[in-house]
Amino acid sequence: MLNALQTRILAVVAFLVAVAALSSAVWWFGYQSALDQLEQRGRSDLALASDRLTGELSRYRELAVLMADHPVVAAAVDGRGAGAADLLRETADKTGSLDILVVSRNGGEVASASGTGAEAHGTTPYFDRAMDGALGIYHLVHDRYGQRTFLFAAPVFSAEGPVAGAVIVVVNVDAVEAVWRGARPTVFFTDDLGVTFISNRSELVFMARDPRAALRGDTAEYAQGVLRPFITYEARDQRGHSVWSVQGQRYVPQRALHLSLPLPVIQMTGEALLDVAPARLLARLQAGVAAAICLAFGAMLFLATERRRTLAEANARLETAVEARTAELSRTNADLRHEVSERIATEAQLKKAQADLVQAGKLSALGQMSAGISHELNQPLMAIRSYAENAEAFLDRGKADVAGQNLGRIADLARRMGRIIRNLRAFAKQESEGMTDVDLSGVITAVLEITQTRAKTSGVDILWTPPATPLIVRGGEVRLQQVVLNLVSNAMDAMEGQDAAQRIELDAAMVDGRVELYVRDTGPGLDEPDRIFDPFYSTKQVSQDGMGLGLSISYGLVQSFGGMIRGRNHPAGGAVFTVTLDAAERAEAAA
Ligand code: ADP
């Protein structure tokens, strides 16, 4: 697997290779199109140069033809040559010809502008052409003039018809060439023997492509000695263009596009060498621009991808961090849920424990009271027994009315016992949860009935005046009885055995829309008022059977009714407990 760095390096290298390939292609196509244009321009230049040469030469050709018709020339051919030389000289001067010759039928020269002397033309190809009645064209290095010449030989027809002789116009090639020497491009004209005869670069003249080539000349003087080997070059075909790599030449471009144009009129081939350096420079420029654009674009692309990659990496890091954080949060969440469910379970356990405690508290209270209760029931029973025995005796004595009174008392006592038992049963029963409207006075009366015997035995005064209007509160009747019973029992416990007066005052009233119950005693007061509601807090002797649960259970019960219980010491001595409860709606309405 390649890592990210290697991948990037590979991409950059591939891109550079692609750019190199593209710029090469641009270079190649640019070069080709530049060569095409160069060739187009070169061809027109070459055609122009050729036209100038052929145009220049055609002047002399026409001169030869015209002169052939001249009567003086015709006479000269016939051997009546007086005055011909003057005409020829004059014409040569005016036309700039090197020489004009009149040749007789046998090839002998009868007159000439230069007057140099007789020369035999009999075997020359141009004279043969003229004798055939056509225009002879020839070029050669003439030893008579010592330079390159172009010859036009026009036939001179006799009055009878056949060719009687010829007029030869000799053209000075140097003069023709001088007009465009040094002009661009390099142009040269080669003859059928492969020798450069005319050129706008004088260095190229007399260069022969074939080392064995001969130079056209009148004598051997101009033979091989004048000829030089042609420039060294290597021709390469570039998509239809012939490009020469030329070596060691100052006057010919090093790399040149070679063009050629056949010129049958003067029996030569025109050739041109055009410098391809500008074309190459242009192609290089185009390739360079293409490469620069690609590189700039690539660099931009690279920077953009780098930026994107960096952003993506940062994003990935962020996402990982977020994922980790999310996982952590989920774990915390799960922990919290677990804790919550544990708490709910604990709460349920607590509730159950509380309910058990309520029951336990009740049982404990029941145990406490059982002695008193048995006493409570025993007393009326004893009374009933004595009333029954008395009634029996009175009946025997025939005192039916007194016996009836006794029976009435028995009935009262039995009713009272029944009430006590009913209260006890209700107290022992575990009340199902839920709240109803409860008459607070009824609750207090029931508690006082249960504790009445103990109060009497211990010499406790209980002061309780039920209010004129019933005080209806929200709560559970039995649980409320339990709370009040606990307060009254605690007060009796606290005052037990004291010499001072033992008194319990109960009072209930409506205060600010709520019902308040006060239980005040004349005992020693609370030792530690802040701790009395703590579970298992008890100052009682073992003999008094204190469990320290009564007040804490009462606290929980009153709270479950939406109420409140408080305990404090009265300034005048003794403890005061206040129970605040919600008034039932109808009680509120009544108030
Ligand atoms: P127990 O009665 O089993 O001790 P309680 O919760 O009912 O448990 O009472 C806790 C303690 O509060 C008692 O032991 C006592 O010290 C104190 N106490 C309660 N009521 C009174 C009172 N009327 N006078 C003085 N102390 C009291």
Image: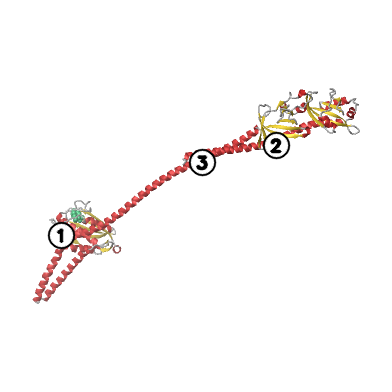
Q: Could you say which quadrant of the image residue 361 lies in?
A: bottom left
Could you tell me residue 430's position as x and y percent? Answer: 24, 62
Disc 3 versus disc 1: distance between alpha carbons? 99 Å
Q: Nearer the viewer, residue 248 or 305?
A: 248
The CB of the residue at mark 3 lies under 8 Å from ligand 1? no
Whichever of callouts 1 and 2 sits on the residue coming sooner in the sequence is 2
Where 392 falls versus 296 (above or below)? below
- Give the colour scheme shown: secondary structure
SS of the residue at dot 1?
Answer: strand
* Three-letter code for the amino acid on which mark 3 is drawn: Ala
Q: The C terminus appears in which quarter of the rendering?
A: bottom left
Mark 3, other Cα within 10 Å: few <14 / some 14–19 / many ≥20 = few
Which residue occupies 19% across, 55% down? 547
Could you tell me residue 284's position as x and y percent? Answer: 61, 34
Where 180 falls versus 354 (above or below)? above
Q: From the viewer's perspective, tell me whether residue 483 is left or right of residue 299.
A: left
Q: Which residue is mark 3?
A: 304
Where 569 falls versus 65 (above or below)? below
Q: Could you say which quadrant of the image residue 420 lies in?
A: bottom left
* Three-letter code for the amino acid on which mark 2 is drawn: Gln
Whichever of callouts 3 and 2 sits on the residue coming sooner in the sequence is 2
Q: Which residue is mark 2?
A: 40
* Three-letter code for the amino acid on which mark 1 is drawn: Val
Q: Nearer the viewer, residue 165 or 386?
A: 165
Disc 3 versus disc 2: distance between alpha carbons? 46 Å
Q: From the viewer's perspective, tell me whether residue 46 is left or right of residue 504.
A: right
Q: Quadrant location of ligand 1? A: bottom left
Whichever of callouts 3 and 1 sits on the residue coming sooner in the sequence is 3
Q: Residue furthest left?
A: 397
Q: Which mark is residue 460?
A: 1
Q: Residue furthest front?
A: 212
SS of the residue at dot 2?
Answer: helix
